[in-house]
Amino acid sequence: MGETRWTRFLGPAAVAALLTAWLWPIGLGGAMPVGGDVTQFQIGLMAVLGEAIRDGRLPLWNDRWGFGFPGVAESQMGVYYPPHALMFGLLPVEAAYTASMVMHVLWGGLGARWAARRFGASEAGAILSGISFGASGFFLIHLPHQWAYTAGSWAPWAFGLAWSILGDGGRRTPWILAAVLAVQILPGHFQLAFCTQVGLLVLAMGTVLVARGGRLRALRRALAVVLPIAAAFLLAGAQVVPTAQLAHLAEGQRDFEYLSGFAATPIHLVNLVAPELFHRSPLWRTVAWDPFHTSPEELRLYVGLVPLFLALGAIARPGPDRKPVRVLMVILAVASVLALGPYVPGFETYCQWPGFSFFRGPARWGMIVSLALALLAGLGLDAIRDGRWRRPGPELIAFVVVAIVWISAVLGAFEAFLKLGEEPGRSGARAAADRVFAMRPWDDKRTVSSVLAEARRPRNDPLTLARHSGEGIGPVPAAGLRLDRERIRIYRKELETTAVVLTLLFATGLAPLGRRRGVLVGVLLVLTIADLGLLSRRRPIGLAPILPLTEQSEVLGRLAALPEGTRSVDPMQNLAQVAGAAPVLSYRTLDLPIQTGFRSLVDRFPRNDREALAQLDAQRTLGARVRVIGPIGPGVESLADRFEQTGRLESAEIVADPALTGWLFGRDYARTADGQAGRYLFLDLGPTPRSWLITAEDSETIARLGSGSESPEEVIAALGRARPLTTRTTAPEHLEIDVDADARSVVVISQLHYPEWRATLVGPDGRPNPETVDRVLGGWQGIVLPGPGRWTIRLDYEGRAERIGLVVSALSWAGWGGGLFWGSRRKGG
């Protein structure tokens, strides 16, 4: 009775408090995340979403995304995701983004705690499950990725509901599960939603397999889990339908090379017991990550040493009710195999199946692995608490020994390979090592010798040196950094926290706590909190005050002072959208590449006056008023002079912006002499056209370039002979252009060609007529004027796919509401 009363508040409060501390100072500490995908990809999009919500419209078309892009269809703004409407509609983008991160990390931890209770864990076990999932390595490495922690936070709630259905859940529970799965789809980037759905299928099938009796009843309950998965796609139709249209248009060759990238490797599974190994030093990337086609930004399987030990204990001692443990074991096994991707036989077959063929990054199945381990850990703690685990001390010592042996074996193997590279005479041993290395799933011609050559190659690039120094690994030698010479210091730095925790676990195993189980449980909880808390210092993001980014960055402030929608060529990818600018060199996950040939012209330093002039011509052709170059070290003044001497600029200024440098290249680089300078060259061409009237003489050029050629010189020449036009924009989805034509001609608009755009041509007689929008000049829009006279072109983004999706969702939610009402009225609802 007492536990029930307290669990309504203290359990969730404990998980929320611990995860708030794990994130500190993000959120309540007054700091916001910056750097990586936070600033270069996501926050610019969310600024556009927030403005659209406050204007009372759907951002069907994001006209700030380079040459424009379908905002809803690309999905990662999460336009229909309810928390986004609330937070980004009411708060400034910086505060909203921070609140979203904090809320979803807490939501994930609270969901794991709630799911653990559904699987039968005590409150102490459930708290352990909550913090070990919410503070796991998965959430840590994906803090820069809004899509990951947002979608991932709903997974434990889905598993808890599904388990309730498979047990004695009421008739309403399947309807609630369908809603949860639909909401998990809505933030965009559907991979983790797919992982959750497959995990639920495994959960349902596993329950049927372990059922001792009543197999038909188990099948019916399993079906009650499967049907909500199908229903979720209909409920989320508003997002799914337009994204399916874009995905079809953007579909490239998703071959084995693409789909097998970013997998968990057998080597990196050592991070289950040593989470910092191969992660802190930048020297590891070319040796321990790139040869295996994966990256430290995608893979860190860790739930804590204590939770891992307890999860193994739960598997060894499932207790009288073995069903939850057995089912979680099945989920853990399947998710682990899927996370290993190409390292497991059969991947080449199933990676072509629907769903599996949509996404790369098998390591992201680590979310399901982490959740299963966290839930098992809670049940393992209960095995100690209830006295079913009679000798935890000796087994804890054995666990520590195994962890040490595991780490030693991995490092020993690396040392053995390194030794081969230092002894050229051992050709037989090297050939054997090459045969082992060739067992990797890719035939990329790498050999042990070529990889070890990277370990001996001196590194002097400023970014590597800055990160090395920032990690406190040691001084940088004058000859540069070499992994083979720095490795002992790197081992010590990357293993020091693990060594401390393992030592404390060993001491706990030696302590006479066999009969004082309450004390042992408390010690294990404290060690888990300390272990995961220390790991939180390795967050792959920087921190900044929760203030407008346009006030913190001088470059963004300059962009914000220009007319809204000003196009820019800059190194910030999507960040310039925060300042109301439209970055041409932006980034998208579902992409329709356009004018990529210009990148070589406008994304490098000019070597002479001729190249400077050519770059300004290319910039004007792209409709980009502003170009930002940097950060630039000594000699920036001569570069500014080179551009000014062309006579094409309205202004050229050198702007100091160390804050922006830190966001783009990391806080460690920003602290160096080069980073503190953080100077940028801000070039302003003045107003630039976005549409042109092409004469009939150039019609053949237009037709030829529209077939796919992207020769920037020919595009520049064609538009250089054209007449610039004025484009009026009443909303991103509505454009108008007035044209006085002397003959049959073509109007070119430097906006992405997309099938949802429709044109209306109002001719000299005043009658509106529909007109075809052609794809010209490598992906822009072109409209043919049939003859001389004064014409008005009206372009409208119709959004038919978006409307169909909204209808599907509306009808589905209406049916869902009726079903939920029916389930509530039925007996047992």
Image (tube, helix red, strand yellow):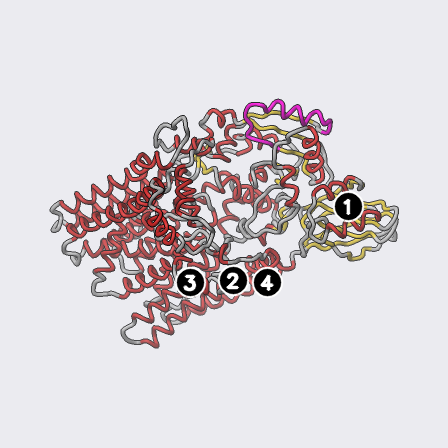
Q: Which residue is mark 1?
A: 737
Which tag, 4 or 1, sits closer to the chain's start?
1
Quadrant of the frame with the C terminus: bottom left
Q: Which residue is mark 2?
A: 235
Name the residue: 28% across, 45% down: 412
Which tag, 2 or 1, sits closer to the chain's start?
2
Which tag, 4 or 2, sits closer to the chain's start?
2
Instruction: Provide the residue span drawn in magenta.
Output: 628-648
- Using the image as rendered, state which of residue 801 and residue 511 is in the foreground: 511
> Is there a contact, CB below 8 Å, between mark 3 and mark 4?
no
Residue 461 appearing in the image: yes
Could you say whether the residue bearing mark 2 is in a helix, strand or loop? helix
Instruction: Bin the neighbour count of mark 3 within 10 Å (Cα to Cα): few under 14, some 14-19, many 20 and up.
Output: some
> Is there a contact, CB below 8 Å, between mark 4 and mark 1?
no
Q: What whole-number distance in Å separates the C-alpha atoms at marks 4 and 1?
A: 32 Å
Q: Residue furthest front?
A: 425
Q: Is residue 634 magenta-colored?
A: yes
Q: Which amino acid is tagged 3? A: Val
Which tag, 3 or 4, sits closer to the chain's start?
3
Name the residue: 61% across, 49% down: 59
* Residue 598 appears left or right of 475: right
Q: Which residue is mark 3?
A: 198
* Residue 33 appears left or right of 168: right
Q: Which residue is mark 4?
A: 807
Could you say whether the residue bearing mark 4 is in a helix, strand or loop? helix
Q: What whole-number distance in Å separates the C-alpha atoms at marks 4 and 2?
A: 10 Å
Q: Position of residue 473 (x, y in %)?
A: 34, 32
Which tag, 3 or 2, sits closer to the chain's start?
3
